[in-house]
Image (spheres, rainbow, N blue to C red):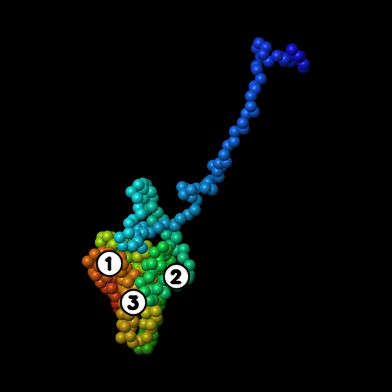
């Protein structure tokens, strides 16, 4: 036994009451794998939860699906997720992606509406329909039609040396007519196509009908010409082009509705022509 510094130690490890020293191979160090739990969201999400924002799809994305194609929806979705999707329709953020469109895209889609017999509009907008172009097309038409009608009325009164007063109702009536038409007519057509089990998407119907009104803008400008028969011809041609644009682009989907597809096509034509007649009668029929 040795002593030092007030403490004593046993030289013999086998002595009674002592603790034997550990012998054997050196202990292995435990290694911990790297974890990304300290970062949120994790860098490797593997398709679970991602911080990236994805634009919402159409309420019914079967509009661009081929006839007879199987749907990819599964029956295992929760009701809470479905309700959350429908509640998002009443938020501004849900429609933000539909206004995220380039100028070149809007110009190309307007150009498509000028040539109604191509029938490629739905193919080009199936992946990314927009509401920006339809909104501004409709808004521009409202002010152009009201302004041209006011100007034509003013010239007519001055020509006949009659007193002229500005009619503010031209703007309000035009807004109610065109905004209401481009909103509720596609909505009604959506319900009808759904009833006949024809594929239809509400947002793309709004997009299609919004761009179909563009042809009425140059028609309104040409209505300055003070010839009554010429104005009727312009209104008829504009209505025919607009109706053809809608019908041709909906042809493949209307045919899926069965034997009554002709009634749907006739309804589309009559409504578009009726819009042209209302535009002519109310805005460009001058009475002095």
Coordinates of residue 113 in the picture (x, y in percent)? 38, 74
Residue at the front extreme? 25
Quadrant of res 172: bottom left
Q: Residue 269 location, x and y as percent?
A: 28, 73
Identify the residue at horizontal 48%, vertical 50% (top origin): 50
Mark with earlier residue (2, 1): 2
Mark 1: which secondary structure? helix
Q: Nearer the viewer, residue 61 or 227?
A: 61
Image quarter of residue 280: bottom left
Mark 1 vs mark 3: which is more N-terminal?
3
Question: CA gap, disc 3 to disc 2?
Answer: 19 Å
> For the residues carrying marks 1 and 3, which lies nearer the camera in this image?
1
Q: Residue at x 29, y 62 (%)?
A: 198
Q: Which mark is residue 275?
A: none
Front residue of this view, candidates 127 and 71: 71
* Disc ID at residue 241: 3
- In this rendered view, identify the residue nearer to me: 183 or 206: 206
Which tag is nearer the camera, tag 2 or tag 1?
1
Residue at the extreme left of the image, as rendered:
259
Can the viewer see residue 28 in this picture? yes
Residue 170 visible in the snapshot: no
Which numbered disc covers residue 255? 1
Estimate how packed mark 3 is, as few (under 14), some (14 to 19) or many (20 or more) residues with alpha carbons within 10 Å. many
Percent across and percent down for residue 52 are 49, 53
Q: Could you tell me which quadrant the C terminus lies in?
A: bottom left
Q: Is residue 181 left or right of residue 258?
A: right
Left or right of 49 in this view: 286: left
For residue 106, which numbered disc appears in the image?
2
Q: Residue at x 34, y 70 (%)?
A: 249
Marks 1 and 3: CB-CB under 8 Å?
no
Q: Secondary structure at mark 2?
A: helix
């Amino acid at each position: 036994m040795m002593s030092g510094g007030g403490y004593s130690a046993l030289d013999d490890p086998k002595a009674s009451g002592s603790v034997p020293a550990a012998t054997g191979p050196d202990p292995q160090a435990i290694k911990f794998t790297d974890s990304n739990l300290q970062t949120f969201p994790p860098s490797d999400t593997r398709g679970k939860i991602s911080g990236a924002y994805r634009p919402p799809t159409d309420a019914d994305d079967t509009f661009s699906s081929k006839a007879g194609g199987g749907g990819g929806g599964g029956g295992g979705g929760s009701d809470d997720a479905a309700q959350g999707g429908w509640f998002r329709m009443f938020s501004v953020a849900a429609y933000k992606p539909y206004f995220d469109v380039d100028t070149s895209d809007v110009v190309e889609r307007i150009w498509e509406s000028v040539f109604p017999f191509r029938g490629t509009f739905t193919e080009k907008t199936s992946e990314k329909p927009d509401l920006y172009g339809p909104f501004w097309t409709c808004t521009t038409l409202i002010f152009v039609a009201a302004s041209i009608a006011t100007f034509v009325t003013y010239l007519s009164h001055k020509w006949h040396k009659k007193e002229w007063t500005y009619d503010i109702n031209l703007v309000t009536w035009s807004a109610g007519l065109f905004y209401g038409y481009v909103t509720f007519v596609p909505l009604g057509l959506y319900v009808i196509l759904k009833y006949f089990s024809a594929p239809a998407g509400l947002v793309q119907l709004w997009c299609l009908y919004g761009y179909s009104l563009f042809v009425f803008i140059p028609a309104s400008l040409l209505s300055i010409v003070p010839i009554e028969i010429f104005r009727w011809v312009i209104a008829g041609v504009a209505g025919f082009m607009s109706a053809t644009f809608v019908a041709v682009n909906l042809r493949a989907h209307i045919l899926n509705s069965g034997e009554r597809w002709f009634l749907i096509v006739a309804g589309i034509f009559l409504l578009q022509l009726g819009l042209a007649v209302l535009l002519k009668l109310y805005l460009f029929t001058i009475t002095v």
